Image (tube, rainbow, N blue to C red):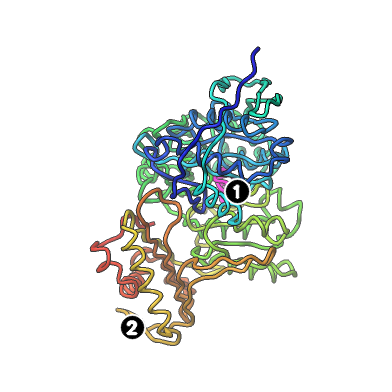
Amino acid sequence: MSNHLVKCVQTTPYLDQNPGTSGLRKRCKIYTQKDYTENFLQSIFDNIYPEIRETGCLIIGGDGRYLTKEVAIKSVQMAAANRFRKVMVCKDGLGSTPAISHLIKKFQTTGALILTASHNPGGPEGDFGIKYNVQTGGGAPESVTNAIFETSKKLKSYYICPYLVPDLRNISSLEYQVEHLDGEVRTFEVEVIDAVIDYVSYMQTIFDFEFIKSFIDKGLGDKPTKICIDSRNGIAGIYCTSIFRDVMGLPEEYIKNSTPLADFGGLHPDPNPFYAADFIQKIVDEECEFGASFDGDADRCMIIGKNGFYVSPSDTVAVISASALKCIPYFKKKGHLNGLARSMPTSCALDKVAEFLSIECGRTCECYEVPTGWKFFCNLMDAGKVDICGEESFGGSSTHIREKDGIWVCLGNAFDNLAWLSVLAYHRKSVSEIMCDHWRKFGRHYYSRHDYEDLSSEQGQAVLQTLQILIDSDIQGREFKTHNRTTRVSRADNFQYLDPVDHSSSFNQGYRIMFENQDRIVVRMSGTGSQGATIRIYVEHYEKDFEKMFVETQEALSDLIHLADQLTNIKLITGRDKPTVIS
């Protein structure tokens, strides 16, 4: 067999290849521009030391959206040309973000290229993304992504083996002889792997599958507990089918939209009450006790109870954390939690749980507040400071990997809720009653996020500038009157984070206005969109009076929402009378 020749292709740099909080996400039409994908891949490879490439292994996989297979093959071709010893490619190019994170740790690889735009829409008119995860299993830290961006702006050429085309349809391991520009011939191995089996086996070491299955089979009374698992035609489908149908033996009718499709079958792969309203209605119509809906790459999960009862992501991570030591074998074996962590915009419900666990366990369980972006949790986990992390955008996970993990949340939250239901079956309690028990114990954090999408960059910056001027005016101590209450500002700032592990600093992470009654308003610009600007406004009201914990969320927050609109001047700046999405 003849050698595969490396080709050096002259290119022109693009100036917009700045990875956001979770990789470089752009419209597909951007990624299909001449050399756009190749430039970004080369910029990543140029920031991996040659000696690491020559001895290392790279994992490649994605969520199945449009361009996944083509870019997976292109990644193999360029890895070969950049002197990688080996690549492990997920069969058909399909692998979830959490599963790939697990594989990095299991096989101790150099890292991974994860081909996903997560919860962004798919298809030719949708989004595509490339994310580089490092050898810890987590997303590349800012020092690396900044270096990649700087490289991309000066790139003059990339390297590729254009005729090396592996077959990704079957599990296999093949070796290719690659002849480099200096005449050296190196062996390059391509192993096509099953990205499902290892992950499912790992989940069985964390959760008690038999216990979960037993409860679903027996239910609360005389019939099984009916559940609904909706993968939105994203990558979660192949994992949910394996776990719930093949391992647990549950009816296939419980598993919806389980085939990964390039355009997600027209469904929006963002599991929130707005984009997944059809799923919530299905829970109601089919009288399910429990439902879980995932995003494109299976790292986010929305939990719904009977009659469409919505469990907010902030409450999800709080409930899991409060019950982990009793209900999840992975933590029961450990016997304690070192700490918890949440992203800054996430509600303070987790803080209350940390305070309780510190007293109950007789040792400090600190709750860390980090910027948005899962990579900020990784240092804390690597240093053994935290065990469970969560964010308001439906992401949650633990130290078992270094990524957020939607299926873990589903199993974790299902395990918690269903375990609680099995224990409380005698009392005939529903999922909503379980949440009420949590609120009775810790108080309720009414919480909502208002997204203003597809704004111009100028509009987005104008909103942020309005807040900066407000903070510069020394807002602390000022009173604000709304329709039903008067509240005083206790603190206002632009959130800055000092990493307690490596002492690196992150600035301009979002504006916070905090009040003496524990209410909060947070405003930040999203880093996960593919075009334009998205302003997210978060409002949070802490309620300790149990009798006042059953007001509809938007009604309970109406005063704070009105105040947030006034302080940001967002409606006047954007010309809009309401948010694009409310969750």
Q: 200 or 47, which is in the foreground? A: 47
Judge from the rendering whether residue 502 lies leftward or rightward of residue 236; answer left or right: right
Figure check: 206 above or below 364: above
User: Of tags 2 and 1, which is closer to the observer?
Assistant: 1
Q: Which residues are magenta?
A: 403-419
Q: 523 or 85, which is in the foreground? A: 85
For label 2, count other residues whose C-alpha is less than 10 Å away and answer few (under 14), some (14-19) or many (20+).
few
Residue 423 placement (x, y as % from top left):
62, 51
Name which residue lies at 45% across and 73% down.
Answer: 520
Q: Amino acid at mark 2?
A: Lys
> Alpha-carbon distance for marks 2 and 1?
42 Å
User: Which residue corresponds to mark 1?
Assistant: 403
User: Which residue corresponds to mark 2?
Assistant: 481
Q: Looking at the rendering, in which quadrant would you find the N terminus?
A: top right
Figure check: 580 above or below 233: below
Mark 1, secondary structure of its residue? loop
The reply to whether residue 230 is visible in this rendering is no
Residue 442 placement (x, y as % from top left):
56, 68
Name which residue lies at 34% across and 59% down.
Answer: 457
Figure check: 545 above or below 98: below
